[in-house]
Image (cartoon, helix red, strand yellow):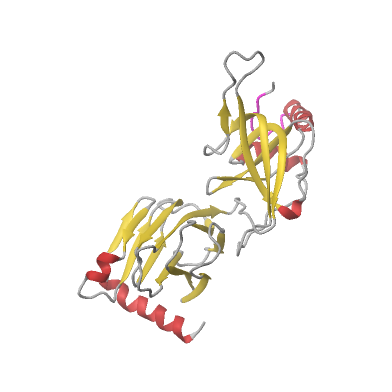
Amino acid sequence: MSPTLSLIFMYVLFLCCLSPCAADLCNWTGSGLAREAEANSRTVQQVRLRCTEGSVEWVYPGQALRVVLEPNLSSARHTTVCIKPFRSFNGASVYIERAGELDLLMTDGGRPEQVFCFPADGPQKPAIFLLANPQRDISQRAVGFRYELLGNRTTAPNLGQSVLQASCRPCNDTELLLAICSSDFVVRGSIRSVSHNAERQTSLVEVSEGRVYRQRSGVFERHTGTIGVPGSSSSWHGHIHTLLQCHVKPGGGEFLFTGTEHFGEAWLGCAPRYKDFMSLYQSAWAARQNPCEFPLD
């Protein structure tokens, strides 16, 4: 770590007690203008958040902001923190505070909407440190990000400096049966199209004519049929992200898509053909080895 960052960290430790903490359950929005106007402006503003996911928005950033993530579910084990900067992020650099040091995560002007993940399995609560950049014109300055705390069994997309890597290998029978029980989404449908993003190193799978068995958020939406058109009915539609290195291609037939959701995006886990999964599940159900129930239709 450079001498400059060492001085920054010592500065934080010394001055944090001078700045009152702001806290709410999940989200925080504040301005650096009020802090700059105070007689003693050489303070670090502190924020403590109590949820496993939420957002931070800091308009007109001034001096520094320290965000400590302290979820109320103290019994839960969270080993990874992921943040996704807003598209309009401008005016500060982001550091991760761990083991008594500050590690640079993202500089001002970096790639917006890129996901950054870092380990959070140490004895200290994970903290994110934002250092405002000195600028004369602050009219267009605003920094913000969404955050998620992930557990041991959660996989994160391998974007930017992610510490976890999604797997491209096919799931075995045990993983398939467990996927319908523990995944954030379970969707039956067909692949309508696949597009690729070389910059993000990801592929986007468009799923249509589907049925949603479970989803954590509104990633998949119901499209209603056209009134007066024979045979027109409502169906589910959505998009699923995966790694470019997985070489996903359009294929005919129905699939059962499972996976995790991060920052409002669905990420692919296991995706067997629907008829193959049903054959596996029916055999497990007959032998009373199914870990959870799934509709037989």
Foreground: 61 or 268?
61
Quadrant of the image occupied by residue 292: top right
x, y (%) of residue 52?
46, 51
Q: 19 left or right of 209?
A: left
Magenta portion: prevailing SS class:
loop
Quadrant of the image occupied by residue 255: top right
Q: 238 left or right of 246?
A: left
Which quadrant is home to the C terminus? top right
Q: Which residues are magenta?
A: 288-295
x, y (%) of residue 32?
31, 65
Foreground: 184 or 34?
34
> Which residue is rendered at x = 68% and y = 38% of the image?
257
Whether 180 is among the magenta residues is: no
Q: 38 left or right of 81?
A: left
Up-down: is 283 above or below 124?
above
x, y (%) of residue 265?
57, 46
Up-down: is 166 above or below 273?
below
